[in-house]
Image (cartoon, rainbow, N blue to C red):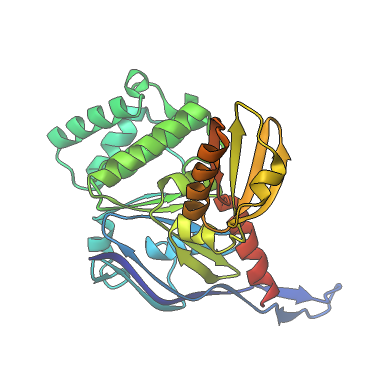
Amino acid sequence: MNAIVVENLSKQYTLPKRSKGGGMGTKKTQNTQGNVQAVDSIGFKVKKGEIFGFLGPNGAGKTTTIRMMTGVLKPTAGKIKIFGLDAWKNQIAVKQVIGNVPEMANTYLSFSGWQNLMFIGELYGVSKEERIKRAENLLKRFDLYEKRDVKTKKYSKGMQQRLLLCMALMSNPKILFLDEPTSGLDVQSAKIIKQIIREYNERGVTIFLTTHDMEVANELCHRIAIINHGKIISLDTPDNIKRLIQEHQAIDIYFTNGVKRQDIEKLPTVKEVQEIKNGFRVIIENIHDSICELVEFIKESNATIKNLNTHEPKLEEAFLKIIERGSKNE
């Protein structure tokens, strides 16, 4: 079942008119600057219970897309369905099943952490008894319970971000939209937020996540869409996206006794051998075949392996290559 279906979604902004001319007593004329296509006919589906990453460089259309999906911005064209409901024809029903943490959001700074949660819970129609129960559980889980009566203007950025996530979860949403949830956070806060994302996803909550942190995306996301200049240019699992740019694979191998480089180079599956500190980097095409071959070579050579590591492209490398390719094709 799909939690989110997006079809031919577009958002075009008309730039404001600029005044020209105009000295004293001179009539000014108005010129339209033109239109900006922020999101250009994109489509994708997010499965129920999935952590779906939405990546792209600054200005690619990520935040605009999230704002349309969460009812903040009206699309110029296209459809958004949340659990089968048209997001714009059923705004109230849709808002009842989603939680949202925008990138530039803030808590009510004159309220304490506890008051923020009570207020949000009341807005969502959560009963007082249930509000208290959920707030206590969330504040304890996010390591904020001891600071519950402190006004949030005194919270650190990490504490603010954790509280925002608490607020988004007060309604027990089925879908959670997170726009850069770990941006600029200390290690502890980022770790807590990642743990919570995993925890709620394991409970069945669908997560729609934008981030510039490729390690977070690689670690958490089941699938990733990459958007650039308003268009989706790649959509797949993190592993498959990394394989798109994979020209070769490599194995770093370290021996406790002497093995000669030229002996490894003779192996049929080996393309190249590079010497590294205390070992060799073996460039190959197929991990399975090469490891099997290396094992036989080691047995015949009476060598002993000290350590062995396989290498694959990082998601960040794949992301940059895909963005570069996309820009060249335009």
x 66%, y 39%: residue: 280
Question: Where is residue 1, by image quadrant?
Answer: bottom left
Q: Nearer the viewer, residue 89 or 51?
A: 51
Q: How many labels does the image show?
A: 0
Residue 18's spot in the image, x, y percent?
Answer: 72, 73
| Residue 255, placed above or below residue 324 | above
| Residue 169, placed above or below residue 90 | above
**Is residue 90 something one can see in this rendering?**
yes
Residue lying furthest front = 300
Residue lying furthest right = 23
Q: Nearer the viewer, residue 311 or 14?
A: 311
Asked whether, in this view, residue 324 is left or right of residue 87, the answer is: right
Residue 74's spot in the image, x, y percent?
Answer: 42, 70
x 13%, y 33%: residue: 129
| Residue 115, placed above or below residue 245 | above
x 26%, y 50%: residue: 205
Q: Which of 305 and 20 is in front in this view?
A: 305
Q: In which quarter of the image is the C terminus?
A: bottom right
Asked whether, in this view, residue 51 is left or right of residue 39, the answer is: left
Question: Where is residue 284, by image quadrant?
Answer: bottom right
Asked whether, in this view, residue 208 is left or right of residue 36, the answer is: left
